[in-house]
Image (cartoon, rainbow, N blue to C red):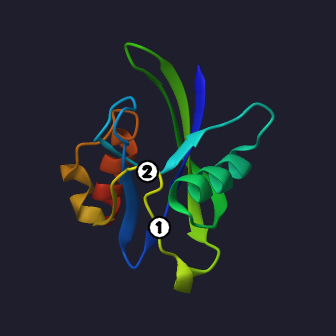
Amino acid sequence: MIHVCAAVIKINGNFLITSRPPGKHLAGQWEFPGGKVDMNESTHDCLVRELYEELGVDIIPREKIYSIKYEYPEKKVFLEFFKAVPVDIMNFNPVSYEGQGIRWEESENLCKIDWVPADLPLAEYLCKLHG
């Protein structure tokens, strides 16, 4: 089972989401940004590293808000979602370093997006909660 963590970042009522980069599993579908947890790495350290490597942003992970075990035909994942905030909100400007799409989405639109299956339950919950 692959351990993955993702950041749920909400600023001014909008959530930061990214699409899976070309050539990767589920390319083009949307997800909350994050990545695989390395051996002996904490989930918080993973989030800080992944968001800096993929988007060039510094974040502070907060509390875990959701987790799911999901079985794709080709692999199994354990995905943990954490609320996260920018270190410096005035200079928080995500950049696509891996060819992924980046966008800010209003909560009521989260139900209308082509999500990777493991992220879909949280996206639907946030859509209903905030939408």
Q: Where residue 21 sits: x, y (%)? A: 37, 42
Residue at 53% across, 54% down: 7
Residue at 33% across, 54% down: 101
Q: Specify the amino acid type for callout 1.
A: Pro
In this view, the residue farthest toward the bottom is: 90
In this rendering, the answer to whether 80 lies above or below 45 is above
Image quarter of the C terminus: bottom left
Q: Secondary structure at mark 2?
A: loop
Q: Point out which mark residue 94 bears.
A: 1
Front-most of 120 and 37?
37
Q: Which residue is mark 2?
A: 32
In this view, the residue farthest toward the left is: 112
Residue at 47% across, 17% down: 75
Front-most of 10 and 45?
45
What distance separates the C-alpha of mark 1 from that of mark 2?
A: 13 Å
- In the rendered image, which quarter is residue 70 located in? top left
